[in-house]
Image: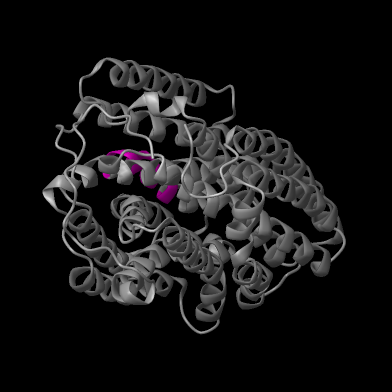
Amino acid sequence: MTTLTTSPAPAPTLRPRATSLRQAWIPMTALALAFFVEMVDNTILNISLPTIGRDLGAGTTALQWVTGAYSLTFGGLLLTAGSLADRLGRRKVLLWGLAAFGVISAFVLLVTTSGQLIGLRAALGVAAAAMAPVTASLVFRLFDDEGLRMRAMTVMVVIGMSGFALGPIVAGSVLASFHWNWLLLINVPIAVIAWFGVRRGVPADEAADLHSAPLDLPGAALSVLALGAASYTLTSGVEHGWLSWPTVGVAALALAALTGFIQRERTTAHPMLDLRLFRGRTVRGATLAQLGGSIAMIGTFFGLVLHFQYAYGWSPMRAGFANLPFILTMLVATPLAEQGAKHLGHRVTCLIGAGLLTGSLVGMAWSVEHGYLAIALCMVGMTIGLRIIMTICAVALIDAMPEQQTSIGAALNDTAQELGTSVGIATVGTVLAAVIGSQLPTGTWTTAMVSTFFTGERTAYLVLALLVGAIATYGANTLTNSRSTEEAH
C-alpha cells in the first residue's frame, strides 16, 4: 500500500479485525443494504421514464434530468463527502446519509410535476453522496487479510449491481398495480434497516484512523463546481445545442473550476485530494477503467429502457424482467474477477474486461434489429466485462490510498462511475435527439418510427463502443501486473 501522504502515519489500531465473512455478517449486511439502496435508486425510475413522461408531460430532455439530477449532485459531492468522512468519522457520515435518504424518499408522495421530481432526485443525490464512498471504505477496513478484502468487495459489488439491475424489475412489478410515485418509497424501509444495522454492527472510527488535517474548503467548493458544471454541460448540449451559449458558458465554467481545483490541490498544505497519488499507475488506471465501464453500462441501460417500451411496446413489468440476463450473469460471473486477478494479473484481466465491453457494444448496435435474444447475449458479455472491471479496480484503487484516506479513494472510484453515468446518458440522449427529435412519439409506433429509432440506437451504441474502447482499454493497460490486491507503485 502506498504511503504517499502529508499527514503522519496513523498509530496502529487496537480494534480487532474480522477473520471471516461470517464473523462480520452484521456490519457486512448493513453496509451491503446501504450500497443496495443507493444502487436501486439509480435505476428504479429508469423503467418508468416513459410512464413518467406521459404522466407529467415530460420530453426527452426532462426525462434525462430525472435521471441526471441525481448523478449531478451525487457526482459533484462525492469527493467532498469522502473527505469529510475521513475527518469526521465514516460511520457517522454514513448514518447521516442513510437518515436523509430515507426521509427525502418519503416526500415523493407529494410530487406532481417534473420539476418537483427533478428537485427530489437532486436532493437524494446529496444524501447518497454521503453514503457511497463510506460503504466501500468501511467494508475494506473490516478485514486485514487481502483475500478477505477481495471477497468482501466481491460480495458488495454483486449485491450493489444486483440492486442496480433489480430496480427496473421491481419498478415494472410496482407499476402494474400502483402509481409510479410509490417507487421511491421502497427506499424508506431499506434505509431504516440499514441505519439500525450500521448503528449496531459497525464500530465508530478511532481517532488514529481519521485524517487529522483540516478540511480543504476552497478545494471542496471548486471540486463541487467543476464536477457539477461538467455534468450539466453534457445535459445542456442535448437541451440547447453543443455550440449554444449556455453549453459553452457552463463548459468554460467547468474548465475554470477544474483548473482552480488543480492549482489549489498542488499548493495547499492539506489538499482534499493529493494529486501526487495519480502518479501511481493503479490510481490513474483504475479510475479511467471505472469511467469507461460506467459509460457502457448506463448508456446501454438508458437506450434499452426506451427500446423495450417504445420500439417493442412492452409493459414496464416485461421490460423490467428483460434485464434478468444482467442479474443472472452478475451472480454467475462472481469468481471471474478474483480468479482472473490471481492467474492473469490485474492488467491482463481488466484488458479482457475492456474488450468484452467494447465488443458487446458493437454487438448491441447489430442486435437492436435482430430481436431480444441477440440483445440478451450482448448483455451477458457486457456484464462479465463490467464484473471484472468494477471489482478489480475498486479493490486496487482503495488499497492504493493512504490508510487515513480510504474514503476519498472510494469517492474517487464512485466519482469516475458517476461521471460515466452522465457521459453515457448524454451520448445516447444526444444521438437519439438528433435522429428522432427531443420528443418521443406517444402511442403505438409505426414501422417507420421504429426503424428511425433503431437507426439512432445503433449509432449511439457504436459511438459508445469507440468511447468506451478507448477509455477502458487505456485505463486497464495502465494497471500493474499484480496478481493480488496489493499493488506495486
Q: In x, y percent, where is residue 376?
A: 75, 66
- Is residue 355 found left or right of 267 in the rendered image? right
In the rendered structure, the answer to whether residue 119 lies left or right of residue 296 reads left
List the single residue furthest toward the bottom. Answer: 177
Q: Is residue 76 magenta?
A: yes
- The residue lying at 76 percent from left, 59 percent from top is 378
Query: Which percent across, then down, holds residue 334?
Result: 59, 66
Q: Position of residue 66 (x, y in %)?
A: 47, 53
457 is higher (above) or lower (below) than 47:
above
- Residue 249 in view, yes or no: yes
| Relative depth, front residue between 80 and 349 | 349
Q: Is 161 included in the stretch rendered in magenta? A: no
Q: Position of residue 85 (x, y in %)?
A: 23, 47
Residue drawn at x 39%, y 40% as measured from the top left: 1
Q: Nearer the viewer, residue 64 or 267?
A: 267
Q: Nearer the viewer, residue 294 or 343?
A: 343
Callout count:
0
For residue 26, what is the image quadrant?
bottom left
Query: Could you say which is closer to the camera, residue 130 or residue 109?
Result: 130
Apparent side of residue 471 relative to residue 49 in the rendered image (left or right): right
SS assignment for the magenta stretch, majority: helix
- Left or right position of 307 against 299: right
Q: Residue at x 31, y 56 (%)?
A: 141
**What segment is highlighted magenta in the picture?**
70-81
What's the image's color scheme? Answer: one colour
Work out whether residue 44 can be spotted.
no
